[in-house]
Each structure stands twice: as structure tokens, then as C-alpha cells.
Image (cartoon, rainbow, N blue to C red):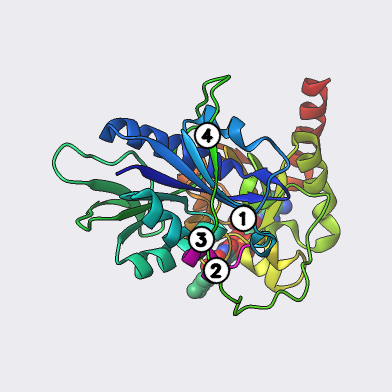
Amino acid sequence: MSVLIFIDHSDGAVKKASLEAISYGAKVAEQLGTTAEGVLLGNLNEDIASLGKYGVKKIYHVADAALDHPDPQLFTDVIAQVVEKSGAKLIVFSNNLHGKAIAPRVSAKLKAELVAGAVALPDTGNGFIVKKNVFSGKAFAFIAVNTDIKIISLNPNAFPVSQTEGASAEVVPFAATIGEPRIKLSSVNKVTGEIPLSEAEIVVSGGRGLKGPENWKILEDLAAALGAATACSRPVSDADWRPHHEHVGQTGLAIAPNLYIAIGISGAIQHLAGVNRSKVIAVINKDPEAPFFKAADYGIVGDAFEIVPKLTEAVKALKG
Ligand code: FAD
């Protein structure tokens, strides 16, 4: 009857979004009067037991090298085995890249209803009702989950990481039956030396208002001063001013940083769809009528080429 949380990691470290999912799962377990357990596939560079500080009491660990790179089909099979063994009735994922690939498969395999993109703890007072974002964050839906096994995938940045220093989890090696992978990984091309956009706390993003790729230096300087990742609107990546992995919006990456700074971006609805879950939005645009100002917490009306270098200097001065 426990809550089982999928522990997602990359380069040997647990992702922040997954720590949020662990904290969330632990809180739901407390709410349901049961225990929170984790399932970890592959290996970490850190002490696995120490993840107990986020609230998991037990971690099923499948240390097989075949699982070092996430393969959604293999992961689904192994998670299903762990669910069977543990008797978990609620499975929690982060609604991040891996969660989006694995949770629906686990849902189909276990015939367990999935609420993807949860933003709050479930209401367990009368049934099991989960709040989630719909219409690109424009509204909320409250979904009643009725199956015996339930699955929630939590939106990144929707729930804080909480920890109890010194707490540790029991690590249980799990001998899973691992089938033949149907996907063959031929190579991994990693972007190095940059803050991954999906994990970034601060994002500095540019649009067509920057006029051309040669002008991105001012945006990169600001991002470097803030320790931020860089992003862009779709026309910018379509024009090859910036790489496609920086494109945010309805047809690009959906992000939820603590601070999103939009520079020379009009704020079309398709762009907002990917960034409107940011905690704070700051907009720099020379057109006071730009729609982005309606979604902004802070706005500066003015020329980006004047404002951004001044902002960078101010940030540098503040940081000493
Ligand atoms: P523009 O609309 O050209 O806006 C440029 C802005 O820069 C203007 O507001 C202007 O006032 C300002 N500006 C100009 N010069 C300066 C200056 N010197 N200083 C300060 N400000 C200045 N778009 C996305 O971004 N992501 C998506 O995922 C996406 N998906 C889409 C899906 C569909 C099906 C469709 C139809 C469209 C999609 N779009 C998407 C495109 C979207 O509709 C907009 O066309 C796009 O977001 C506009 O990009 P932009 O704001 O960079 O450019």
C-alpha cells in the first residue's frame, strides 16, 4: 500500500525535479498514513541511502548496467516488477523528460490511471482528486483517480524540496528480469559546459527583437552574470540564430524556472505556453503594447541594446 517514487538521475546525480517528486511522494505517503519508497534504476555517484533525507524509507535499487541509459520500455518493465513486489498503490514521477516517456507506459501496462502534470498534493478526503494544469497553464483541472493503482507525475517546480538532515533510507538490491532492449543507443551527444535549460533556476531568453545571432553576446553576458541558462523564441531557432534545444513554447520545451527574463520577445500565446509556469517573469521590450507585459511580474519598456548591458553591469556590481 506504499507510495513508490521513481528516482530520476543523470550523470550520477539525482535531478532536482526528481528530488521534488520524492518530497511530494513522501508528503502524500504521510497524508495516506503509509510509507514512501523509491525505485532507482542504474547507479549514482552519491550515497543512495542518503536520499532518505528527502523522505523515502526504502529504495529498491536495480544496479544493472543495461539501465545506465534510460530506455523507457525497459524501465517500464522493471518498474512494473518493483510495483508488484512492493505492493505500491501510488507511483510518483516527475513530469520531466524521462517521466513523460515512462509514466504513460507504466500507466498502460498496469492499467493505472495517470494524472500528468500535477501541481498540488492530492485531495484524499473524499476519493483521490489531483489538481493539474490544463490549456497550457491557463486553467486547472481536478481529476478524480479511481483505479486501484494510481500514478501522478508532478510538474517541475510545483512542489518544494524538503529534507530532514541525517535521515537515511534502507537500500534493497532488486534482481529484476531485464529484457532485450528494442532501442539501440548508438551515441550520446551531450551539450556540455552549459546549464541545462530544463533544470535552470534562472533563464534569459531572446526573441526576434535581438535582430540577429551576432547580437546574442549581450544576452549571454547577462546569463553568465546571473548563472542562468539561455533560451529563445521559435522564430529565432527556426532561423538558426540559436540551436533548437533552446526553443521554448508550445512546440518547444516547457520550462518553469524561478526567474524567466524575456528580451525582445512579443509574448505570443504559443511562447507563453512554454514559460507561464515560471515563478517570476521579467520582460524587456521596446513596445509598451507587447502582449508579454500582461503576463509579466516586472517589465522594462525600452531598447534591449541599451538596457541589457546596463543590467549585466548592475548584476556584476551586486555580486561583487
Ligand atoms: P516577434 O513577434 O517578431 O516579436 C519581437 C519583439 O521584439 C516585439 O515585441 C518587439 O516590440 C520587440 N523588439 C524589437 N526590437 C526591440 C529592441 N531593440 N529592444 C526590445 N524589444 C524589441 N513561438 C515560440 O516562441 N515558441 C513556440 O513554441 C511556438 N509555437 C508555435 C506553434 C504554432 C502552431 C504557431 C502558429 C506559432 C508558434 N510560435 C511559437 C510562434 C509565435 O506565434 C510567435 O510568432 C513567436 O513567438 C514570435 O517570436 P518573437 O516574439 O521572438 O518575435
Q: Amino acid at mark 1?
A: Ile
Q: Amino acid at mark 3?
A: Ala
Q: Residue at coordinates 23% horizontally, 54% vertically from top-left?
A: 145
Dot 4 or dot 1: first in sequence order is 4
Q: Position of residue 179 (x, y in %)?
A: 56, 73
In the image, 260: left or right of 127?
right
Quarter of the image with the N terminus in it: top left
Q: Tell me the residue that label 2 is attached to.
A: 74
Q: Secondary structure at mark 1?
A: loop
Can you say whether 57 is above or below 72 in the image? above
In the image, 140: left or right of 315?
left
Q: CA distance from mark 2 to mark 4?
A: 24 Å
Q: Tell me the residue that label 4 is attached to.
A: 170
Cβ of mark 3 under 8 A from ligand 1: yes
Q: Which class describes the residues within 10 Å of circle 1: few (<14), some (14-19), or many (20+)?
A: many
Q: Which class describes the residues within 10 Å of circle 4: few (<14), some (14-19), or many (20+)?
A: some
Q: Tell me the residue that label 3 is attached to.
A: 268
Question: Answer yes or no: do the residues labelled 2 and 4 have beta carbons within 8 Å?
Answer: no
Q: CA distance from mark 3 to mark 4?
A: 49 Å
Q: Which residues are magenta?
A: 70-78
Of badges 1 and 2, the one in the foreground is 2
Q: Amino acid at mark 4?
A: Glu
Q: CA distance from mark 3 to mark 2?
A: 39 Å
Cβ of mark 1 under 8 A from ligand 1: yes
- Please state which of residues 142 and 126 is positioned toward the viewer in this rendering: 126
Q: Residue at coordinates 69% horizontally, 63% vertically from top-left?
A: 245
Quadrant field for ligand 1: bottom right
**What main secondary structure does the magenta stretch of the protein show?**
helix
Q: How many marks?
A: 4
Would you identify the image quadrant in which residue 209 lies?
Answer: bottom right
Q: Tell me the residue that label 1 is attached to.
A: 265
Q: Is residue 75 magenta?
A: yes
